[in-house]
Image (cartoon, helix red, strand yellow):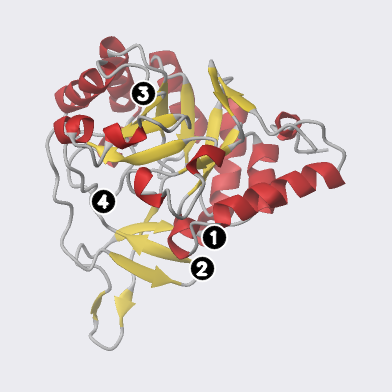
Amino acid sequence: MADLQVKLGNLSLSNPLVTCSGTFGFGSEYGDIVSLDKLGAITVKGISSQPANGNPTPRTAEVYSGMLNAIGLQNPGVEKFINDPEYLPSFENIDTPLFVNIWGKTLEEYAQVAQSLDEVGKQISALEINISCPNIKEGGMAFGTDLDNAARVVETVRDVTSLPLITKLSPNVTSIGQFARKVVDAGTDMISLINTIPAMSIDIESQKPSLANITGGLSGPAIKPIAVRMIYETAQAVDVPIIGMGGVTSGDDVVEFMLAGADAVGVGTSIFSNPGHLMTMLDELEQYLDNHGFNSVTELTGAVKTS
């Protein structure tokens, strides 16, 4: 059998499958459904300096080949996340690397949550800086679609933590390579992409938007070709580990993302319909590697043949 282990900088993952922030809760609540120790890494919901209630309901809507969401980054705040047994302490006996997604409405809020998490110690493997959420009115994508602002967020977080940093880029830019280079120069250790794409649907019976927020983020298979293209462009622009995500539903999708340049692959929307499918994806990935004569999954990364 091929070796599934991957390296993200100094971090070792038993395999390339990572859960996407916002799609796997705070992780431990899925322990009865998914073998958490068999995942490459777990990324928890976005954490802010203060509790956030999120957006009004309805906050999700199914659309053709995907879903819309406008959750609005609801979370208990960093203090409760660190101390409440329901959240971070529940990972005490779980060896799978834990990535904590962080966000803020200001640079100071990013710094506050990053510094608080830095003081936790070895239980957290990396911070994922969210500068790309389209469903909050302040912060989020406002930082991720401006080159200088994106760099400032990364620099601010880098100044207050020694934890490895993953910067989650927005797909809503004209040159993803420029943003990748900017955040790498600012101090990020890794890049994750893509986040959801702003979209909208309307209920034709009520003639009202499907979401109370009117617009939301489109995820699922509908955005996969966009993700593949942006992962490829990012891999050409920078030489840091990339976690690719966006519409992954099978082991074949994992292979495609890695061929485009991803070192690890995030799974999100498909978790909602069948969390246990994560294990099936691993089996499918192993089968592909064996069928095609690969000794290690890392041989896939960036191996797309363009000529």
Q: CA distance from mark 1 to mark 4?
A: 20 Å
The alpha-carbon separation of the residues under discs 1 and 3 comes to: 33 Å
Q: How many marks?
A: 4
Residue that numbered label 3 is attached to: 123
Secondary structure under tag 4 reads loop
Q: Residue at x 48, y 39 (%)?
A: 193
Q: Nearer the viewer, mark 1 or mark 3?
A: 3
Identify residue for label 4: 135
Does residue 258 appear left or right of residue 179 in this picture? right
Q: Amino acid at mark 2?
A: Ser
Visible residue check, residue 130? no
Q: Quadrant of the N terminus?
A: top right
**Distance in Å between CA atoms under marks 1 and 2:** 6 Å
Q: Identify the mark at residue 65; answer none if there is no mark.
A: 2
Does 90 sit above or below residue 225?
Answer: above
Q: Which residue is mark 1?
A: 221
